[in-house]
Image: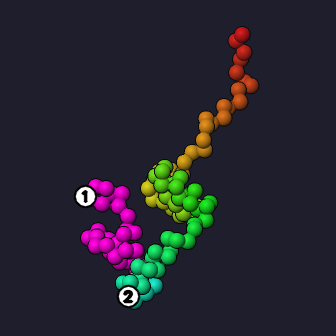
Amino acid sequence: MSRHGVGRSSYRAHALGAADPLVSAHALYRAPGRSPARRQEDYRLRFRAREDEEFVGELRQATNGGWPVGNDRFKRETAKALKCRVTPLPPGRPPRAPPDKRQMRLL
C-alpha cells in the first residue's frame, strides 16, 4: 500500500475499528447501529454473506478492466459525460466486411 492510500481498503476501519485518517464513517455505515461496536459487528456480518456469483464476476471484470459497474442507463450516462467508451469491446477481431460486388475482378 502506498502512503497516499492507493489500494487501501476501509474494512479494517469499519469492521475492526482501526484508526485510519483517510476513512470517514459515511451514512450507510452509521445507519445500522448506534454504538461503534454494533456498527463494526454489522459491517463484519455484511462481508460474511456470499455475494451473487454473477455479480462478483461482473465486478471482478470491471475492476480489472477499469470499467464502471452499473445498469445500462448508468453506463450510457457515464459514457456521455466522459465522452468515451465505458464498456469493453467484444473479444476477438471484428468480422470482415463482405467484398464489394461492384469491384472489378483483376485476376
Q: Is residue 76 visible?
A: no
Amino acid type indicated by mark 1: Arg
Q: Calculate the distance from the C-alpha at mark 2 to the C-alpha at mark 1.
A: 30 Å
The image shows residue 56, relative to residue 100, as above or below, that is: below
Q: Is residue 23 visible?
A: yes
- Say which quarter of the image contains residue 97: top right
- Say which quarter of the image contains residue 31: bottom left
Amino acid type indicated by mark 2: Ser
Identify the residue at horizontal 50%, vertical 76% (top origin).
45
Q: Nearer the viewer, residue 54 or 75?
A: 54
Q: Position of residue 5 (x, y in %)?
A: 30, 60
Q: Nearer the viewer, residue 90 or 8?
A: 8
Task: Name the residue tied to disc 1.
Answer: 3
Q: Position of residue 103 (x, y in %)?
A: 70, 21
Which sits earlier in the primary sequence, circle 2 or circle 1?
1
Element marked by disc 2? loop
Identify the residue at horizontal 54%, vertical 48% (top origin).
88
The image shows residue 41, relative to residue 64, as above or below, that is: below
Please state if 79 lies on the left or on the right of 54 as rendered.
Answer: left
Q: Quadrant of the N terminus?
A: bottom left
The image shows residue 34, relative to residue 44, as above or below, that is: below
Mark drawn on residue 35 = 2
